[in-house]
Image (spheres, grey):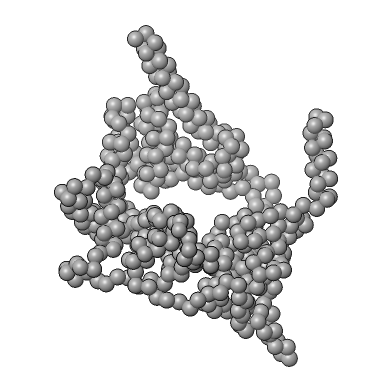
Amino acid sequence: MTRFRQASDRLVDADTAVRRAEADRLAAVAAMIDAYPAPTPIVESPAAEKVVSAGAEGAGAIGEFVALEVGALLHLSEPAAWSLVHDVANLRARHPLLWAAVADLRVEAWQARKVALAAQDLSAEAARWVDAELADLWGVVAWPRIRRRLAGLIVRADADLARRKAEIARRDRFVSIRHLGDSTSVLTARMDTAAALTLEAEITRITTRMRKDGAQEPLPILAARALEEIATPTTDDTTGTPGLPLADVVVHIAAEALDTAATDATNVARVLARGGDVGPVLLDQLAHLLGHHRIRVLPLTDLAGDPSADAYEIPDRLRRQLVIREDSSVFPYSTSRSRTADLDHTIPYRRSTPGSPAPPGQTRISNLGPLSRREHRAKTAGIWTLSQPEPGVYEWTNRAGRRWTVTRGRTTEFRDRSDERIDLVYTSCVALG
């Protein structure tokens, strides 16, 4: 028991040291705020430092470059440093009882910062009321319970603010589906709470039925199965469930995968749905995947072809072919998806002028490539130059003369002999000390 008691004491001492260090860190930031000199512009200029709010209402003011100082000392980005400055200024001025609890090591610094952030939209008076309501909980009540109480107090402190936030949240509803490429997808959504409760009740009803039918999987798996059942109702449902959804689905199957003599199950297709790239799918999984949709058959896309159009605007048939061939931006090492990218003319499109009609066929697969908006702007500005010596081969050069080739999502950097000599000299100098 002696060794166990020693280990226990060591754990408590370590936790105390961490709390003290974090409290000291907040106090040191407060000292930086107090010691930071008031802005005194050397010259009148738009670049001169200005006085800005140090935090929320009642937190005081500070020179706007203080975050640069704090960030450099703590190895933080400017936004992260500003977040820390705001939290410290707010805690001191708007939550004095909590600030004292941090100094007494009764509450961890990160918890105090969570409170300051949650209350930042309140008036100074309302923030101090929340501070007083929480004062007797620090050190004696677990953080999850304090967090739940904090949410209620903020609503009580300013009901009108809570209503405005709720209205904003309702306007910001969304559904996002991200396909993982392993026959599963992640669904994230923000929806009206009443509708969410109805959905939750329906999922509970289905999982309860599954349990009664003998299902043994953990509840989260059953809940996922229930949601899948809601999204893909059976055709023998007589309750008036609407028909299966219509979907544009492109299934790209390599020629070798159509070998009927193959006996293994390793042949793979790539499926592109309206919502994005579903990813690689085994051929024997296609029936399961596509069985939940009424399929619209699209014209066959020949990826080896080079169709063109005599206009700047890119027809859907060209866009579809290019997106299938290039699933990501063709900029070096880019991860931007082509479905949401700009389709750039490698050789800039030349429009008609009086007496000089536009050359035909400028908008063609061999003169197009997907780029994110920032990459597109850099190329258009001439900071990066691009050529496409053959369809699907993109050769990039930056303003320093370095070159990269991007082919089918693979980036290769070209190094000339002068680069190699520079590296050799640098390596030799390092070796010599």
In the rendered image of this protein, does residue 211 appear above or below residue 394?
A: above
Q: Residue at 30% of width from left, 36% of height from top?
A: 144
**Does residue 30 lie above or below 404 as drawn?**
above
Please name the residue shown 81% across and 46% down the image: 420
The part of the image, by quadrant, that contains residue 329 is bottom right
Q: Which residue lies furthest to the bottom in this view?
A: 355
Image spot of residue 39 (x, y percent): 61, 43
- The front one of 415 and 33 is 415
Whether 137 is drawn above or below 261: the answer is above
From the image, which quarter does the N terminus lie in?
top left
Quarter holding residue 5: top left
Quadrant (top left/top right/bottom left/bottom right) for the C terminus: top right
Q: Where is residue 307 in the image (x, y as percent from the top left)?
A: 60, 79
Q: Is residue 168 visible?
A: no
Instruction: Give the residue displayed 25% in from the left and 71% down from the top.
Output: 242
| The image quarter in which residue 193 lies | bottom left
Above or below, 35 against 397 in this view is: above
Query: How many numbered marks, from 0 up?
Result: 0
Q: Can residue 238 be seen in this view?
A: yes
Q: Which residue lies furthest to the top in this view?
A: 2
